[in-house]
Image: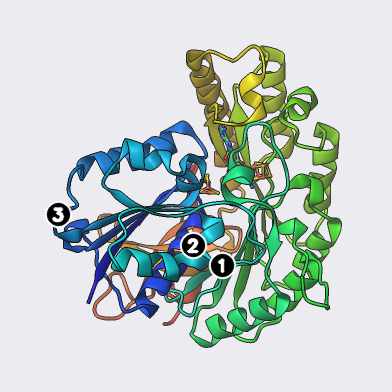
Amino acid sequence: MKRFYIETFGCQMNVHDSEKVAGTLIARGYRQVDKPEQADLILYNTCSIRDKAEQKVYSRLQQFKRDNRNGRVFAVLGCVAEQEGERIFERAPHVGLVCGSASYNRLPELLARIEDGDRRVTGLGLDAQETFETPVTQRDNPHRASLTIIEGCDKSCAYCVVPATRGPERSRSSQLILTEACELADAGRGEIQLLGQNVNSYRDPSPAAWDFVTLLRRVAQTPGLRRVRFTTSHPRDFVGEIVDAIDENPVLCNHVHLPVQSGSSAVLERMQRLYTRPEYLARIEWIKRARRQIAISTDIIVGFPGETQEEFDQTLSLLDEVGYDSVFSFKYSPRPNTPALALPDQVPEQEKGRRLLVLQERQRAIQIRRNSLLIGRREEVLVEGFNAATGQWIGRTSQNRTLNFTHASLPAPDGRTLVGRYLPVRVTRAGPNSLVGESADLI
Ligand code: SAH
Ligand code: SF4
Ligand code: F3S
């Protein structure tokens, strides 16, 4: 039996794609191993969103240079594969398979060619109309699962490689999605996350022609599901009905990730984000007016070409105005074949670094303040693990906050575990990135 090892870089879409790729291999009779040394086939599912992410795969490949003895095959999948294509063979001649995510349905055929001894096999190109469907999806987490609803991206943000690496939008049929949600719930996975680069532009290809909100409402009615999340929402396509749906059904988690990228309308225009600061803030208002308290998180890029100090200050003032519960912030990274490469006034690396620190410092204070508001409250967590070093169980709230807690009657896993259970926990302390609490609930 052939053995494979897969390592994944990048976003949740990639992590979930790897679960499907692993399923495809297992259905073909391969067995998954946890060390590359034990494998006949080593796959890297790669990310190209920033230069640092892209470089990771080359450093991995370097480690194994000239190591295709005994017929060991190296495969590069994902966004770097699609972006670099056959150039990967030049840079890393020991690679045998290069395949982008829009070609994953061809993996069985490509693998058959590798097994027949083909030295160089590629699955490239973005004209696939269909989505990646697998007979088996190899999910390791028994309590939480990802579920793709839409692949690709039809936007054209000036800095972003994704439209070129994942191709145009393709939605999965609502029937497939609902069936998968039912199977996950039946298998005891109470939390699911609906995935897409832009979930709001979901459009059911079946005659039912559901939009995203309809799909969301229906998925949330699946018997056995306790929590439904979704990511990512593009502000331009974010509609008020999403907030109504969250208000109506507590199964929908009270958390929205709404990437803003910049607080300056001028920068947003140069980024081709298709909304202005006031339009973005109007959507934030919808979320804040909800009956449930919905946590809000975002992504920000600092140092986009031409970003002035004043424009950067507007991003800082947006942080204050919104009061985000968490922020993922990045230095702008120039990417191949993107329009932003040609923009004038690239911001020096050092200045980008400075702005990033200023922004993160500002946000840290906001998070301490926001998390402190929860002290004294009871929050329901899904228990995800136990930290032996601190003696705390690790839980996650519906708002997607980490809540580390002690448990009165189960201070440590003594053959029993709380992992996978939903428990009420009283919040006692708050830090910038997590909460601390206590649970006395009977188990
Ligand atoms: N589809 C999602 C984002 C996917 S990429 C959306 O539109 O929100 C995740 C984040 O990476 C983006 O939100 C952006 O903040 C960041 N990012 C994308 N390209 C980047 C680049 N060239 N440099 C720095 N950060 C980038
Ligand atoms: Fe990239 Fe923009 Fe598409 Fe998000 S919406 S994946 S940032 S092009
Ligand atoms: Fe990276 Fe591709 Fe995801 S570039 S962030 S793995 S869509």
- Residue 271's quadrant in the figure? top right
Residue at figure coordinates x 30%, y 55% from the top left: 119
Q: Is residue 62 shown left or right of residue 109?
A: left
Question: If the picture is divided into quarters, which one holds ligand 1?
Answer: top right
Any part of residue 439 in sight: no
Any part of residue 267 in sight: yes
Picture coordinates of residue 156 (x, y %)? 71, 39
* Real-space Cα separation, disc 3 to disc 2, in angstroms: 28 Å
Q: Name the residue under label 2.
A: 17
* Real-space Cα separation, disc 1 to disc 3, in angstroms: 32 Å
Q: Is residue 228 shown left or right of residue 236?
A: left
Q: Name the residue under label 3.
A: 69
Amino acid at the residue labelled 2 = Asp
Report the disc number at residue 181: none
- Residue 391's quadrant in the figure? bottom left
Q: Is ligand 3 less than 8 Å from the beta carbon at label 1?
A: no
- Circle 1: is it few (<14), some (14-19), or many (20+) Cα within 10 Å? some
Q: Is residue 427 shown left or right of residue 256?
A: left
Q: In which quarter of the image is the N terminus?
A: bottom left
Q: Which of marks 3 and 2 is nearer the N terminus?
A: 2
Amino acid at the residue labelled 3 = Arg
Relative to 66, residue 224 above or below: below
Q: Is residue 17 shown left or right of residue 39?
A: right
Relative to 264, residue 18 above or below: below
- Circle 2: is it few (<14), some (14-19), or many (20+) Cα within 10 Å? many
Amino acid at the residue labelled 1 = Phe
Q: Name the residue under label 1.
A: 132
Towards the viewer: 100 or 202: 100
Residue at figure coordinates x 61%, y 23% from the top left: 341
Picture coordinates of residue 299 (x, y %)? 61, 40
Where disc 2 sits, the SS reads helix
Q: Earlier in the sequence, mark 1 or mark 3?
A: 3
